[in-house]
Each structure stands twice: as structure tokens, then as C-alpha cells.
Amino acid sequence: MFLAKGLTVAILFLMVALMLGRARRETLPGLQSGHLDVEALNDRYQAEADALRTLVWDDAAWKAERKARKAEAKAERKRAKRQAEGEPGKARVFVLQFQGDLAASAVQQLRHEVSALLAVAEPGRDEVVVLLESPGGLVHGYGLAASQLTRIREAGVRLTVCVDKVAASGGYLMACIADELLAAPFAVLGSIGVVAQVPNIHRLLKKHEVDVELMTAGEYKRTLTVLGENTEAGRRKFQEDLDETHGLFKGFVQQWRPQVDIERVGTGEHWYGQRAVELNLVDALRTSDDYLRARAREAELYALHWRNRRSIGQRLGLAFEGAADRLLLRWWQRSLHEPRF
């Protein structure tokens, strides 16, 4: 009994923390306080390689490597001096990560990261790489996230999107904006469609003689309801709204990827990477690791991550919300009826 009471109190506390955290986060989404973390990826890649070199290289190889690095450091100082005098330096690649959930809540960090990099990125020279993973979600959330990536294109900065696992529905709405869209061979892409479902328990309530009064002002203020009796007119209007949203979705994809046959791919289906290339949904098959390490040989890479300041209640709420999102993602993956390895 003591354990059961304790669990009950803990669950109630988490639910209250979730509601408080969500309320605090959604009050002024564009004005949260926080800070921007920046990591030099070139240094990380070199440190990772050095950890292995110390085990497999002999002293002579290490000596030659240190000598080569000293020469490179000297050349880099000269390049920095010329850059200070007005000569263009090495290109910079700003790396962002978008891990999508149902509400596209990562857009709150994305907007800060994009604003920061656009303040320093040079059109025609620098590049933004977005590591995108999302099965999609709410229309308005992913619409705003897509608008943030549109800001990069409109500023004249090259945008590359890498998809290693999934960019479906709202995730593909974001991905299609890229100058170049790369995907791993078995990444899931597409799902250019709109879905909505509304449970209705009117017959159950009627069976138990429970009346529900729904008052509206405006013919289509409410089309389908959970408790009341749905009408054919309401169903038709609901379907019209879905079709209109789908048309906007297809038009957006056609705008940014005119090479696709939108009537062929705008059916709500999803495809794996290889097939997505054939349908022009993707430009090439390549993992993000391969692309970034190749770019590191000729450019300076910087990973950006905006971190909001959060109270303890918000952190607990986000932990609970994250667990719910992971359950939803697993359900979505199962709903694809995709084969398992």
C-alpha cells in the first residue's frame, strides 16, 4: 500500500510538472532565455582519431604526424593573417540537429540557432547542414520549423539536409527545402499526406441516456466532435479541410523540389532511400557521418545547439513528455507495417 501511494503521488507530481513546464515554455516561445553552445567539430574528429592513433601508430609515425600538424598550424596562421587583411578564409559549415516530435517542439531551439548563424554566415561561401530526424506531427509546428529553414535559403546560404533514419510527413516538409538532400540507404522518406482521426462516443453516451449540448457560433466552428452526434455535412467539411491542407503540402514540396512528380509522390506513401532517389525525393545516398567528415577536410565545422534555461518543474515535465513522445514514435513505426530485420 505504501508503494502504491508513493507511485500515485509521483505520477500526480509528474503530471503537474508537465503542465507547469508546458505552460512556461509556451508563454513566449520566441523569447526564452538561454545560451548557445558551439563545438568545433574538426577538433572533435581529430581527437577521436588521435585516441586510436596512440594505440596503433609507432613513434616514427607520430613524429611525422606532429611535424605535419606544426606545418599546417603555421599555414593556418598565415591564412588567418591574410583573412584579416581582407582575403577570404576557409569556408565554414554550421551544423544543426533537429530531433522532431509530434509538436515539433525543437523549433524553439532551431529559431535561435538559425538567427545566430545568419548573423555571421557569408552567402555563397558558408554552408548550413541540418541533421534531421522526424516522423512528422502537427501542421502548424512543422510549418514554423520549415519556415526557419526557408530563412537560410532566402539569405543565400547553402543548405544541406542529411536524413539518416526518417524524414516523413512534416519531417519531409522541412527536408525538401534543402539545396541538397542526402539520405542513408534505408532512411524512410516521403509520406506527403495529411491524417486526422477523432474518436466519437456519442452512441455510448446515448445508450446511457447522457445528453451533450454543444453550442457554436459559426456554421463550421465545430465539424467533428468527440461527444456529440456527427453529421454528414460536418464530415464533408472536415474532409475538405484535410484536402486543402494536403494541397498546401504538395504545393510547398513542388515549390522547393520542382523535379519531383508531385502527383506520383503526394499519395501519403513512404519510401526507403534508394527508391526515394529514383523518385527525386532525395538527391543522393550518403550518411551524415560521411558527408561531415568529408567537409571537415576543406572547411571549419561548428555544431550549434541552443539550450533554454529551465526550472526543475520544466525539466521533469520535459522528461515525462519525452517518454510519451518515444511511445508515440514506436507506435508510428509499428503502424507503417514495415518489415523487420
Image (cartoon, helix red, strand yellow):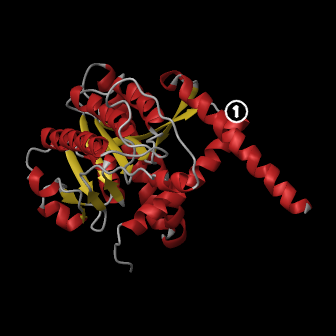
Q: How many marks on residues? A: 1
Point 30% across, 68% down: residue = 186
Frontmost residue, 265 versus 295:
265
**Residue 158 shown left or right of residue 301 in the figure:** left
The spot of residue 252 in percent (x, y) is 19, 39
The N terminus lies in quadrant: bottom right
The spot of residue 234 in percent (x, y) is 31, 41
- Under tag 1, what secondary structure? loop
Q: Residue furthest front?
A: 209
Frontmost residue, 91 versus 209:
209
The spot of residue 65 in percent (x, y) is 42, 57
What amino acid type is highlighted by mark number 1?
A: Ser
| Neighbours of disc 1 within 10 Å: few (<14), some (14-19), many (20+) | few
**Residue 276 shown left or right of residue 318 in the figure:** left
Q: Is residue 312 above or below residue 210?
A: above
Frontmost residue, 110 versus 211:
211
The spot of residue 199 in percent (x, y) is 45, 53
Q: Is residue 3 visible?
A: yes
Give the residue number, with chain letter if any, for mark 1: 311
Res. 103 image quadrant: top left
